[in-house]
């Protein structure tokens, strides 16, 4: 009969090996290729988290050999791995990248499966319309200049506004794609002098692998956390006229 240590070692090798198997995944409107998931470490991180959860389940057992209850638990967890991966929210986020270093492409455009007709044509038409409008009226400019970047964050908050630490590993660093203000906290351009204005960065939610801070002996988990999302202009009237 296998010892618990031997069985855990076999489970780890099996689960980590799944990340290199020929698997295809379907997103809403897009078919993501195996090459994409081999380049992006999200799948590997999902399996690693699943493995760590499984190990914690067995560590709660005091016996040195696997009991029938432990064997049943292992079978249940392993047979549920496919659904766990296929339905995992992190797997369907174009703006999350996991790997050694940040990528150099724009999500929804440069990833395998990008549909030029779907994304390129409307953009081309919109560009022509904008050029026509600009040439026929007045020159225009952004109220707040923005830049796109892949950002790695370490500390943030969860949906309950509690502090969390994003799990960043050497080979599995988590990066988010975001729009940052070029001149954050500076006045917006083109705003009436009747208003105070400020370029600010808004937060959004990203499903990431994190650990809650200040809670000892609690393992990491997946969940939505606050991340920089986009840049916007905040305006406030300087005075209110008397009516």
Image (spheres, rainbow, N blue to C red):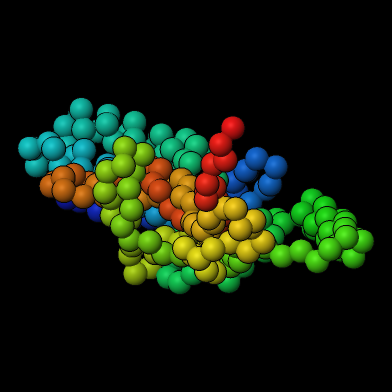
Above-or-below relation of 122 to 181: above
From the viewer's side, name the closer residue of 6 and 51: 51
Residue 8, image x, y percentages: 23, 48
Confirm whether residue 201 shows in the render.
Answer: yes
Q: Is residue 51 left or right of residue 213?
A: right
Q: Is 155 on the left-hand or right-hand side of 227? A: left
* Residue 126 % position (x, y): 83, 55
Name the image quarter holding residue 123. bottom right
Quarter of the rendering containing residue 98: bottom left
**Residue 222 vertical placement versus 136 (above, below):** above
Residue in the image at 58% along x and 61% along y: 188
Q: Which quadrant is the N terminus positioned in?
A: top left
Seen as rendered, the residue at the extreme front is 242
Left or right, residue 77 beside residue 186? left
Residue ID at (53%, 59%): 199
Q: At 33% from the left edge and 64% from the top edge, which residue is drawn?
A: 169
In terms of depth relative to the viewer, which is nearer, 122 or 93? 122
Q: Position of residue 222 (x, y in %)?
A: 36, 44
Tell me the residue at 27%/31% (across/down).
Answer: 73
- Which sits in the foreground, 238 or 167? 238
- The tally of labels here is 0
Instruction: State which quarter of the image contains the C terminus.
Output: top right
Residues 80 and 169: in front is: 169
> Is 2 positioned to the left or the right of 97 in the image?
left
């Amino acid at each position: 009969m296998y010892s618990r240590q031997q069985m855990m070692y076999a489970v780890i090798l099996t689960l980590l090996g799944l990340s290199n198997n020929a698997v295809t995944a379907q997103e809403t409107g897009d078919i993501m290729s195996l090459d994409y998931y081999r380049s992006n470490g999200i799948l590997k991180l999902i399996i690693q988290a699943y493995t760590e959860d499984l190990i914690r389940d067995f560590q709660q057992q005091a016996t040195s050999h696997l009991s029938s209850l432990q064997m049943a638990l292992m079978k249940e967890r392993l047979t549920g791995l496919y659904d766990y991966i296929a339905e995992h929210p992190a797997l369907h986020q174009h703006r999350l990248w996991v790997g050694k270093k940040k990528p150099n492409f724009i999500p929804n455009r440069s990833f395998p499966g990008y549909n030029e007709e779907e994304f390129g044509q409307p953009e081309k038409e919109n560009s022509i319309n904008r050029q026509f409008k600009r040439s026929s009226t007045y020159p225009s400019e952004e109220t707040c200049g923005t830049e796109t970047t892949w950002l790695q964050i370490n500390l943030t908050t969860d949906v309950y506004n509690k502090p969390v630490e994003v799990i960043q590993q050497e080979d599995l660093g988590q990066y988010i794609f975001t729009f940052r203000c070029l001149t954050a906290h500076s006045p917006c351009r083109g705003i009436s002098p009747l208003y105070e204005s400020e370029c600010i960065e808004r937060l959004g939610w990203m499903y990431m692998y994190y650990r809650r801070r200040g809670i000892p002996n609690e393992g990491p988990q997946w969940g939505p956390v606050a991340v920089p999302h986009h840049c916007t202009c905040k305006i406030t009237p300087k005075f209110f006229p008397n009516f």
